[in-house]
């Protein structure tokens, strides 16, 4: 895979850079990133394409560290959130609702219970796995994105502000798992707790109310946050 110099950097994550090039987006991973995970990300994306949750298709390239994707002509929600656009958190709430209402039957992504213990110490497994087991027995499993934040939601380019009917595209599905929706809300809670106390306060106020209507108790949520916090620490190490 050779770029001819006309590629433009459009995004940067912890593991990859994204460029636009000849009408497509390309995700270029660090060479240390395991290529099996890139294969997993492609399979995840296909499952979510089939579930109707994202139109963005992924394609292999001749480089096992570069993925080709349909290009979204847009920007992330982040600049709107930073400008305190009042609809940015509402859109995040809408993104959760859109995902969780999909019937997960036959959607080929792993259950959280199957992957959650990987890479954890025995002690942490002893905390995380019983929480997942308890909440899975209590509530139905849905498709959870498990990395829902402003950089993973895209809106059309050039809007001066968001409106109620702004269309959005949810990206970056590598973490998606089948699990009770409370884990999706908890994971985002842990991310905001880490990056911005102000955002966390708005998140509690504007997004979590839609979760409390779904039969989640404070204990359930606290447990899900505890499990997500431990899994997040593993990711960072
Ligand atoms: N298909 C796409 N079209 C346009 N921009 C994209 C596309 N996919 C990702 N991006 C941009 O690249 C950034 C990083 O991509 P993402 O898939 O979220 O990678 P990471 O796993 O590193 O977070 C996104 O926040 C977004 O700005
Ligand atoms: Mg991302």
Image (cartoon, helix red, strand yellow):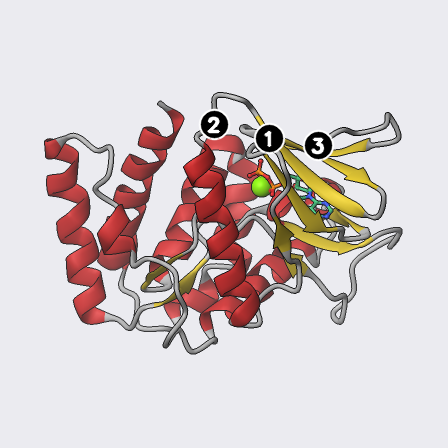
Quadrant observed for ligand 2 in the rendered image:
top right
Does 74 sit left or right of 204 as displayed? right
Numbered label attached to residue 185: none
| Residue displayed at 49% across by 47% down | 41
Where residue 10 sits: x, y (%)? 76, 36
Depth order, front residue of 215/49? 49
Please give the residue where the numbered disc 1 appears in the rendered image.
Answer: 16
- The answer to which quarter of the image holds residue 87 is bottom right
Q: CA distance from mark 2 to mark 1?
A: 9 Å
Does 198 sit left or right of 138 as displayed? right
Instruction: Kindly tell me whether mark 1's CB lies below 8 Å from ligand 1.
Output: yes
* Mark 3 neighbour class, 10 Å CA radius: few under 14, some 14 to 19, many 20 or more: few
Depth order, front residue of 216/15? 15
Where residue 201 sits: x, y (%)? 51, 45
Please give the residue where the numbered disc 2 appears in the rendered image.
Answer: 33
Q: CA distance from mark 1 to mark 3?
A: 16 Å
Check disc 1 and report its element: helix, strand or loop. Answer: strand
Instruction: Kindly tell me whether mark 3's CB lies below 8 Å from ligand 1.
Output: no
């Amino acid at each position: 895979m050779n770029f001819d110099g006309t590629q433009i950097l459009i995004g940067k994550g912890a593991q990859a850079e994204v460029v636009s090039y000849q009408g497509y987006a390309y995700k270029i991973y660090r060479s240390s990133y395991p290529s099996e995970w890139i294969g997993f990300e492609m399979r995840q994306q296909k499952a979510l394409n089939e579930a109707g949750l994202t139109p963005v298709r992924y394609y292999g390239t001749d480089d096992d560290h570069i993925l080709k994707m349909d290009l979204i002509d847009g920007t992330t929600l982040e600049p709107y959130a930073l400008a305190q656009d009042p609809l940015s958190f509402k859109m995040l709430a809408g993104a959760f609702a859109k995902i969780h209402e999909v019937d997960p039957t036959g959607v080929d992504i792993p259950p959280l219970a199957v992957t959650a213990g990987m890479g954890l110490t025995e002690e942490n497994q002893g905390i995380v796995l019983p929480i997942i087991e308890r909440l899975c027995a209590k509530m139905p499993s849905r498709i959870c994105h498990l990395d829902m934040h402003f950089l993973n939601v895209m809106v059309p380019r050039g809007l001066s502000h968001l409106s109620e009917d702004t269309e959005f595209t949810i990206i970056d599905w590598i973490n998606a798992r089948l699990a009770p929706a409370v884990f999706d809300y908890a994971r985002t809670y842990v991310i905001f707790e880490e990056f911005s106390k102000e955002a966390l306060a708005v998140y509690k106020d504007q997004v979590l109310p839609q979760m409390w209507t779904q039969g989640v108790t404070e204990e359930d949520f606290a447990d899900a946050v505890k499990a997500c916090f431990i899994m997040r620490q593993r990711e960072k190490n």
